[in-house]
Image (tube, rainbow, N blue to C red):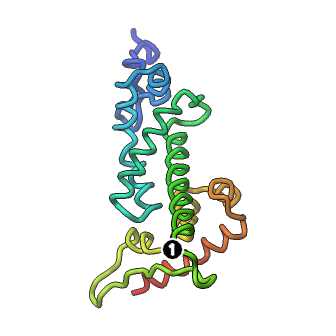
């Protein structure tokens, strides 16, 4: 009589998740680190949607998000050998993408600062689009309308679950600034989403 342990587990690269089989991303990453392009292509297919959503939320711009996704996967291909398996590959890739987006924002901020000297210390506000009577504004559009700093902190904290000290380390801002930006983002979102 066959026992449960005698049931074959399936191919070694697959594991069961909610009744479906999913490739083991850790093993795929190890193969990719050895130069296996097909393994990396599979990692791309498994993660591109999630990474695009992250880049879109953080940038607020669909075409820029596409560029950031590509840059994230190029960076991941270059650094896949540094993935040690201490966390899930998707978590490691998420961190790579966050760093790519934040790096892009820093480069853009420096470029803008060099090109235009500010007239005063006031930071120009991006206005959050308002809905016409009878229309509702969706959350994604409202988040996209937040000023860059507030949007970044809101996404990292409330959407992605980073703590303020982690956001500080990622973005280079003070913990207090992170808390202030989160408060500002929430206040602007409440105003934008008010019926």
The quarter of the picture where the N terminus appears is top left
Q: Which of the 4 image quadrants contains residue 123?
A: bottom right
Q: Can residue 179 be spotted in the picture?
A: yes
Against 80, residue 169 (above or below) is below
Mark 1: give few (<14), some (14-19) or many (20+) Cα within 10 Å.
many
- Front residue of 73/29: it is 73
> How many marks on residues?
1
Against 36, residue 59 (above or below) is below
Find numbered disc 1 in the image and state the secondary structure of the residue it sits on: loop
Q: Can residue 158 be spotted in the picture?
A: no
Give coordinates of residue 127: x percent, y percent.
44, 82
Q: Is residue 96 left or right of residue 71?
A: right
Give coordinates of residue 147: x percent, y percent.
51, 74
Residue for point 49% across, 32% down = 78
- Front residue of 109/165: it is 109
The quarter of the picture where the C terminus appears is bottom left
Residue for point 41% across, 35% down = 17
| Residue where numbered disc 1 is placed | 147
Q: Residue furthest top?
A: 1
- Front residue of 16/32: it is 32
Residue for point 63% across, 82% down = 121
Against 173, residue 103 (above or below) is above
Residue for point 72% across, 69% down = 176
Q: Residue furthest bottom?
A: 133
Give coordinates of residue 124: x percent, y percent.
52, 81
């Amino acid at each position: 009589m066959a026992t449960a342990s005698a049931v074959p587990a399936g191919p070694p690269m697959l594991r069961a998740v909610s009744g479906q089989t999913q490739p083991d991303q850790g093993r795929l990453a190890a193969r990719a680190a050895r130069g296996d392009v097909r393994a990396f292509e599979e990692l791309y297919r498994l993660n591109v949607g999630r990474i695009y959503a992250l880049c879109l939320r953080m940038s607020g711009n669909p075409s820029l998000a596409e560029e950031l996704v590509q840059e994230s996967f190029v960076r991941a291909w270059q650094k896949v050998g540094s993935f040690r398996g201490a966390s899930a590959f998707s978590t490691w890739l998420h961190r790579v993408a966050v760093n790519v987006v934040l790096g892009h924002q820093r480069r853009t901020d420096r470029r803008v600062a060099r090109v235009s000297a500010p007239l005063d210390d006031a930071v120009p506000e991006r206005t959050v689009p308002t809905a016409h009577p009878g229309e509702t504004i969706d959350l994604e559009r409202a988040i996209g309308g937040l000023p860059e700093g507030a949007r970044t902190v809101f996404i990292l904290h409330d959407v992605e679950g980073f703590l303020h000290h982690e956001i500080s380390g990622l973005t280079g801002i003070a913990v207090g600034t992170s808390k202030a930006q989160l408060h500002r983002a929430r206040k602007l979102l409440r105003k934008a989403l008010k019926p």
